[in-house]
Amino acid sequence: MSEEQIKNLEVQFEARIARDEKIEPKDWMPEKYRKTHIRQMSQHAHSEIVGMLPEGNWITRAPSLRRKVALLAKVQDEAGHGLYLYSACETLGISRDELYDQLHSGKAKYSSIFNYPTVTWADMGAVGWLVDGAAIINQVPLCNTSYGPYARAMVRVCKEESFHQRQGYEIMMKLANGAPEQKELAQDALNRWWWPSLMMLGPTDAESIHTEQSMKWKLKRKSNDDLRQQFIDQTVPQAELIGLTIPDPDLKWNEERQSYDFGEINWDEFWQVVKGHGPMNKERMKARVGAWEEGEWVRDAAMAHAEKKQARKQKQAI
Amino acid sequence: MKQNLYNYILGIADNSLILGQRLGELTGHGPSLETDIACTNISLDLFGQVRSYFQYAAKIAGDNRTEDDIAMLRKEREYVNVLLVEQPNRDFAYTMARQFLFDIYHLLFLQKLEKSKDLTLSAIATKSIKEVSYHERFSGDWIKRLGDGTEESKTKMQDAIDGLWTYTDELFHQTEADKAMVAEGIGVDVTKLKETYYKKVNEILEEATLEIPESKWFQKGGKEGVHTEHLGYLLAELQYMQRAYPNMEW
């Protein structure tokens, strides 16, 4: 294809996006669009499956049968999200195995929040309430993103995430209204998860490298800082409602902006975790790579069995 | 309180409780996303059944005890699950072999329990049959895949079947509560399930090109609360929160 033809296709492509048309897997798309989507969607898929680990950590120790069932179902939903998102990603011409390789080799990223440890039961509440809460703020706009398979996957993901967020808040509410020891657990979890949750919405706009292009393709509709403000404004009253204190002495309602002012985020910590030196980065990767390597003989056997079965069928047909 | 009925329910439910807990250990660590989801799903089904049984048991007890008290606040010797279900997840072959050896029994058991004179137990059985039919298909398929897969998978699967075989006979032992409940038309006579069980198990093992173990040495004790050393650790995790933070609601 000549350069001019490509240019022409690009113009038509951008016009389709501007008209809010969905781009489907078989449609022509610029290489950069394809790559950006693989990067973002796989990062999202990886976050779902790495995110199973910190919560999976409490399945065997959940305090009641009801909580255990809810936690199992939640972690299972995350695996399901991983599955749709990997499948959606595969429509862009990359295999799940290649995506796993990128995760295991450290080439692909996942949400840094999952590199923090879940040390008490209250963390199941805090993760649901804050981490899923921040994720929803990031993800709801993606239900209208330009790439069809991603947008459709996100509709389902967001419905389930919103359920998880309510479930997490309900765990926190129960703790906050419980015995003094339980309230302490809740406050401690909020103290530990608040700042990492704010960081989860990404670096400040000045430092975010992908924002402008992503806005054009509707992969992003609001800047990181706007999303963060939205998250804070939404979450502060929820904490107040259950009598918990946000661990930020500078947090203050700003009448003029009709928003909360908040203290400075420790970006050094953010970059430390992003670069692989958070409290649990190595553990998380070890668990994922371990499961994959230990599972190899199982996957090989399933493949070998399927081939044998197919061969027997063909033989019978002759 | 109807002590025999209470004990009888615990005998059924503890199997699901302990197996569900074992499967719950694996969430997030499966050999593929699909098997991970399936094992978590089976765990969920089992815990759902446990809740129905223990809620019923709590009602029969008629005091203040709850489903969680029954699940999480008994002593080691008071759990009456079979030894099979408490065996650890040594590898995926063991996990699937344990599941398979239990599922075949579980489905046969529930099909009889559905005919119980006790309407609550019968209703729980009806609901569980749907779930356990899927479990049985899932684990049976994996026995075939791993048995008739690669050399490596065949060796691992055979090891797992050989290692767990010794725990199968206990499934068909009768406790005092069993006998009393069978006499009242409430319980299932498990001794009568044995022949069909081994027939079904052997058929699948043969299809999986695996050897049927010949050992006639069997372990027992779980139904009387005498367990393998593995159970204590499982209970330590299961009970952790209830022990560390007693008398609280979650």
Image: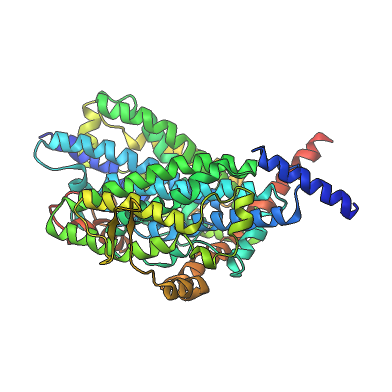
> What's the residue at 54%, 49% (across, down)?
A221
Q: Is residue A202 above or below residue A166?
A: below
Colour logic: rainbow
Does residue A285 appear left or right of residue A7 in this picture?
Answer: left
Q: Is residue A114 above or below residue A20?
A: below
Of residue B154 and residue A224, the one placed in the foreground of this image is: A224
Q: Is residue B229 above or below residue B34?
A: below
Q: Farthest residue to the front: give it.
A: A256
Total marks shown come to: 0
Q: Is residue B182 above or below residue B17?
A: above
Q: Farthest residue to the right: give it.
A: A2
Q: Is residue B72 visible?
A: no
Q: Position of residue B74 (x, y in %)?
A: 18, 52
Q: Position of residue A110 (x, y in %)?
A: 52, 62
> What's the residue at 59%, 65% (across, down)?
A209
In the picture, which quadrant includes the N terminus of chain B?
Answer: top left
Of residue A303 and residue A260, the one placed in the foreground of this image is: A260
Q: Position of residue A28 (x, y in %)?
A: 78, 45
Does residue A194 appear left or right of residue B92 in this picture?
Answer: left
Q: Position of residue A287 (x, y in %)?
A: 49, 66
> What's the residue at 38%, 42% (across, down)?
A163
> What's the residue at 30%, 26% (across, down)?
B122
Of residue A12 and residue A75, the one placed in the foreground of this image is: A12
Q: Is residue A174 visible?
A: yes
